[in-house]
Amino acid sequence: MLGRLGAMLYDRNLAQAEAACLARWRGALLAGARGDVLEIGAGTGLNLAHYPKAVRRLVLVEPDRAMRHVLARKVGDRSDVILVDSTAELLPLPDAAFDFVVSTLVLCSVQSPMRALTEAWRVLRPGGRLLFLEHVAAEDRPSRLRWQRWLEPPWRLLSGNCHLTRRTADTIVEAGFQLEEVRRESIRKVVGVVRPSVRGSALRPARTVPGLTPVAAGAQSPAPGSA
């Protein structure tokens, strides 16, 4: 959790990166969203302006009280948007309720990426899609990866459990999704250890991918095969 000060400074800290690339990436990522959409870890609402009119219902999940306060101010009185106080790992939402699940700069900081992705699977309808934009481990830059590993413990303490070395695309596949489009690119105007990023879309097949068994998220969250 970033707390009140972190929530107040979040948009300002990302402003240069948003102007340089992130806002454009968000817009392209969300352009095809439609129907019922769930965003996990919605933060301060930086995606709000990029959702198209084809989105019928938007559910924003955010566990941090201070971030949710900023988010609520941006949402205002919009009747098509619902705010939910919850973590991504245990969603108080029904099975197969959404056409899209959105995760942007979230899976770096959740306690369990696999559990969060299993929940995303559970609440997605068969044929639904996960849209993601995450900073990740510098797999193609050994020297930067060494810095990420060295800095990760203090970074997590100072940045709300943000991990620098997660291999999010691999975890998405391990959770049973089928990657459809993946782009790896450096986030500009941020410190080097958080520049490597991956974004794209992943399909929630009607059945589990052969050879893969998504991990159950717990008694209240059935495994994807039982959804």
Image (tube, helix red, strand yellow):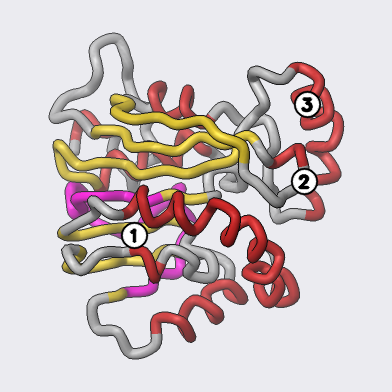
Is mark 1 in CB contact (under 8 Å) with mark 3? no
Q: Earlier in the sequence, mark 1 or mark 3?
A: 1
Q: Quadrant of residue 82?
A: bottom left
Q: Earlier in the sequence, mark 3 or mark 2?
A: 3
Name the residue that disc number 3 marks: 144
Is residue 157 rendered to the left or right of residue 189?
right
Name the residue that disc number 1 marks: 92
- The span picked out in magenta is 82-102
Q: Which amino acid type is marked by label 1?
A: Pro
Q: Which amino acid type is marked by label 3?
A: Arg
Q: Is residue 177 visible in the rendered structure shown here? A: no
10 Å neighbourhood of mark 2: few (<14), some, or many (≥20)? few
Q: Residue furthest top?
A: 211
Q: Nearer the viewer, residue 43 or 139?
A: 139
Residue 149 location, x and y as percent?
79, 28
- Helix, strand or loop at mark 3: helix
The secondary structure making up most of the magenta span is: loop
Image quadrant in which the N terminus is located:
bottom right
10 Å neighbourhood of mark 1: few (<14), some, or many (≥20)? some
Write the residue at 29% across / 84% down.
78
Q: Nearer the viewer, residue 148 or 176?
A: 148
**Could you say which disc has been placed on residue 191 in the image?**
2
